[in-house]
Amino acid sequence: MARAFTPKVVTANHLLEGDVIYLTAADDWSRTLSEAEVITDEAHAQVRLLDAERQANIIVGAYLADVALGATGPEPTHFREDFRRTGPSNYFHGKQELPPQPQT
């Protein structure tokens, strides 16, 4: 028996800035998951992914991510996507310098 298709969004990283971005219904990219187009049809999802991959001058690494419909819009169903949308977990440490090397 075929598995039911779960709602998805198209996500990628901005080519120059590296930020996580989501494809909207208007073919724009947004840094906010709540603005992403929620896709409920498998064939349409594949077409939207192809549309995204054609925008190689803007994005890199496009793929379909599972979501669930929440009160404020789509919510990630996998911890990886939840982690990606909140951004990096580190903070600026200043310039990282290598320790002095022993003289030989």
Image: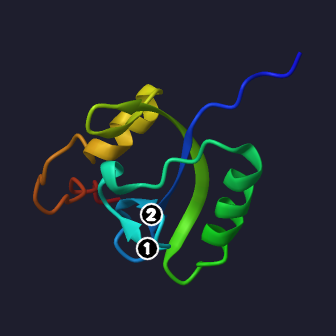
Q: Residues within 10 Å of mark 2 (few under 14, many from 20)?
A: many
Residue 59, x across and y down, in percent: 51, 71
Name the residue rendered at 77%, 51% in the picture: 43
Circle 1: residue type = Asp
In-front residue for pair 45/87? 45
From this view, report whether residue 58 is shown above or below residue 79.
Answer: below
Residue 81, x across and y down, in percent: 43, 37
Residue 23, x across and y down, in percent: 48, 62
Q: Residue furthest top?
A: 1
Real-space CA distance between mark 2 and mark 1, rounded to the nearest whole angstrom: 5 Å
Name the residue rendered at 66%, 71% in the picture: 51
Name the residue rendered at 46%, 27% in the picture: 77
From this view, report whether residue 25 is shown above or below residue 16.
Answer: above
From this view, report whether residue 72 is shown above or below residue 55.
Answer: above
Name the residue rendered at 12%, 52% in the picture: 93
**Pointers 2 and 1 in contact (CB under 8 A)?**
yes
Res 16 → quadrant: bottom left
Q: Residues within 10 Å of mark 1 (few under 14, many from 20)?
A: few
Q: Mark 1 points at which residue?
A: 28
Q: Quadrant of the N terminus?
A: top right
Q: Mark 2 points at which residue?
A: 24
Res 30 → quadrant: bottom left
Apparent side of residue 30 relative to residue 44 in the rendered image (left or right): left
The numbered dot on residue 81 is none
Residue 88, x across and y down, in percent: 27, 46
In-front residue for pair 104/7? 7
Apparent side of residue 82 relative to residue 48 in the rendered image (left or right): left
Q: How many labels does the image show?
A: 2
Circle 2: residue type = Thr
From this view, report whether residue 27 is shown above or below residue 72.
Answer: below
